[in-house]
Image (tube, helix red, strand yellow):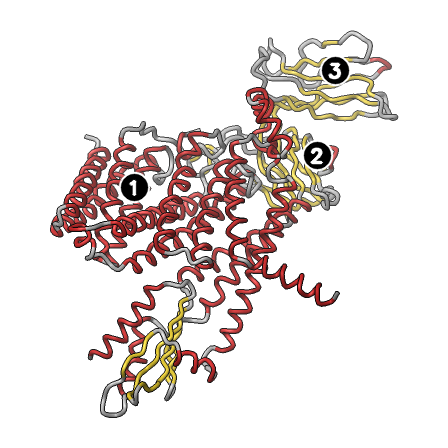
Amino acid sequence: MAVSRASARRTLGQTLRSPRLAVWLLAILIVYMAVSTIVPQRSYRGEELSQWAERYPALAAVTGSLGLHDAYVNIFFLALVVLLAASTAACAWQRTTRATGMLRRLGTIDSGRVGSIRSAPVARIPLTGEDGGDTAYREAASALRSLGLSVRTGPLVTEASSGALGLLGSPVFHWALVGLMLAIPAGQLVRAEGQIGIVTGYEKADVAEEYGVLERGLFHGELSGLVIGVEPEMPLEYIDGGVDRGAAPEVYLRDGESVVARGRVYPNKPLRYGAMTIHMSEHGLGAVVSLVTSETAEESQYLIDRDASSPTGWGKGVQGLYDEAGRELAEISVEPDPESTGRAVVEIDRPGEQTLRSSSLGVGDTVELMDGASLRVEYLGSYARLSVVEDPSVPVVYLLLTIACIAAAVSVLVPYRTVWLVRDEVDGEPVVAVSIRHSRGERSFRERVLEVLAGQEEQ
Amino acid sequence: MNWEIISMWAAVTMYAASAVLFVVGLAFSRPRLVMLATWLALAGLMPHAVGIGIRWVRVGHGPYLGFYEVVSSYAFMAVAGFALLVWRRKNLAAAGVVLMPVAFITLGAAMFTPKAELEITGTLASWWLNLHVVFAKLSYGAFIVAFALAAVYLFRDRASGMLSEVLAKLPSQVTLDDLQSRFVGVGFVFLGIMIVTGAIWADQAWGRYWGWDPIETWSLVSWVVYALYLHARLTLGWRGRRSAWFALFALPVVLFALIGVPLVYSSIHGAYLIGY
């Protein structure tokens, strides 16, 4: 049993290390990604999905059943990434052991290696001269410096090699890729992203109930609970560096009484605090209306978006009015007054009753409700819809991307090269046996080394 | 007088003349014509640079907005890459027989497209854009040169008679093969940096570093295609003819990612090519 388990492990290891598997996985990934751009994606072109299904019903049945409209969260893609990560890890492990072995042996050579170079060299170059070839050997060794190699010469063996850094490029690059293939999906599990609309001059708490749209990863805990505020003044065409940045609210984050972060927010200038990033997304009209009873006055924010079909060009901001048991008492909507700029109309829609539509209202005006309660317009202005992202994995992903780029550059631009010269005799005549290695397998390096050594011989 | 347009047409003319001289020089075994073609190509870089520079100063941003600017600057990078190649290895000048017709046709085509002056928007106004664009141009330039080297390799592989004598002056096939792989390697690294800088920029601008938008996806497809090239070459020993064919077929994928995708798909990335 133990033998079969070991053999199964060995087989698995060999399969994962197989270059053919890696090549096939990369080819499948290419085809899969290309197909995903032809088929509308729910996360990206979701609005086109139904039209596409109507236009190509047979194809849509196939793509739908294969999960191709959720190409990057479906089980096939996840399995492909897991397999690719495992194959890359096996490959990285192999490269690491090879590189560390070579690093350990740097500057040393055992008799077995000397023997193998002597028995099967890339070339044998005669060493001429009256001193038994000593001078020719030293000159040949020295000539290798012209290839940018550092040369260590012994009486019988010369090792010329490029910097050891080149050995690490490829393994580190592959490990960084493995890290990315783990960190990116893990990041999705701990990430939260939502859209929160806040009327200028007002605040909302960073809690799930305040968000219009909120997506949370499986392992994301509660939201921060901080208070997000938008200052009253929000220029709609904010100019910075001579460029119109669009609507740019000044946003702050408050923890209790203390403001922990503050800044004007526009594209390329988000507000950051810990793992939280706040971007400006959209803006529209905003209103704040209070429900006033004999004891309290409770404010609600109404967010009004553009609506091309409406005569004012704006839609309605809608909020439900609930009792303590959570039953909806009424739906209240606010919209701009089509007759008068800077004023609003409030509609109160009670279940089973006729909709009550107010007259034109300005700030401070009230609408009487039943039971002595009333609605009072507190504010009419703008609102900012902010995109709030909490993703602690971003710095890790950036770090791994940076490492991957540097390691790939090292691997490609400074490949490890080594040349061995081993003194030998053929038919009693002194020769030097040459062994050449290039980590990227460049055959022109071999040509170049032999050219340099031949040039030395001719001199 | 519009010096920008005059300079650009001067560049187109020089590239066209260079392309013709390369073809004639190689076809009729006239090394002096090949040399003249090389000098014409290098000289064409000057009016091309002047044209790009004049526009840069006038519109206030680099050559990366709109089809005309994007394609013209990639043609410039391809010829600049050729200049680098010839500077390092003079006997590689014959690669111009592939590169110069490509440069002439792309720049010529760009000259007939609308030259709308697109403004920098709030999303585009970022230092990351500069890095993103620089590495994009470097990587695409490297891939175009690799394409030319691969074409020359395959051309010589099948050439016979007088033509093979002319091509014998080129470096060995082994050297051409290695150079092609080096340019792919460099392009691969630069393309990787382009994707990373783009991701960081997207996070700054939109709050997410990756969204599987068609342009993002196709840039990753291009990167994986070249990863496959390098992997197959290093681990499966795909060298010589196979490697050259791969480099030939890989470039259209990159060009589709750059030019085709913004034209075919509606994307938030469309601004750089078609201005929305």
Identify which residue, B137 or A88, lies in the foreground: A88
Residue at which label 2 appears: A204
Q: Position of residue A199 (x, y in %)?
A: 65, 28
Report x, y in % for residue A61: 62, 27
Q: CA distance from mark 2 to mark 3?
A: 24 Å
Quadrant assignment, res A97: bottom right
Q: CA distance from mark 3 to mark 1?
A: 67 Å
Give neighbour class at mark 2: few <14, some 14-19, many 20+ (Cα, 10 Å): some
Front-most of A428 and B5? A428
Of the residues under marks 2 and 3, which one precedes in the sequence? 2
In the rendered image, residues at marks 2 and 1 fall on the same chain: no
- Considering the numbered disc 1 on the image, is that residue within a helix, a strand or a loop? helix
Instruction: Report which quarter residue A415 is drawn in.
Output: bottom left
Badge 1: how crowded within 10 Å, few (<14), some, or many (20+)? many
Label 2 with label 1: CB-CB less than 8 Å: no
Residue picked out by circle 3:
A366
The picture quadrant where one finds residue A255 is: top right
Q: Residue furthest top?
A: A354
Q: Which residue is mark 1?
A: B75
Expressed as whole percent of the image width and height from the top left, the position of residue B103 reads 27, 41
Q: Chain of mark 3?
A: A
> Amino acid under label 1?
Ala
Using the image, name the chain to which the residue with label 1 belongs: B
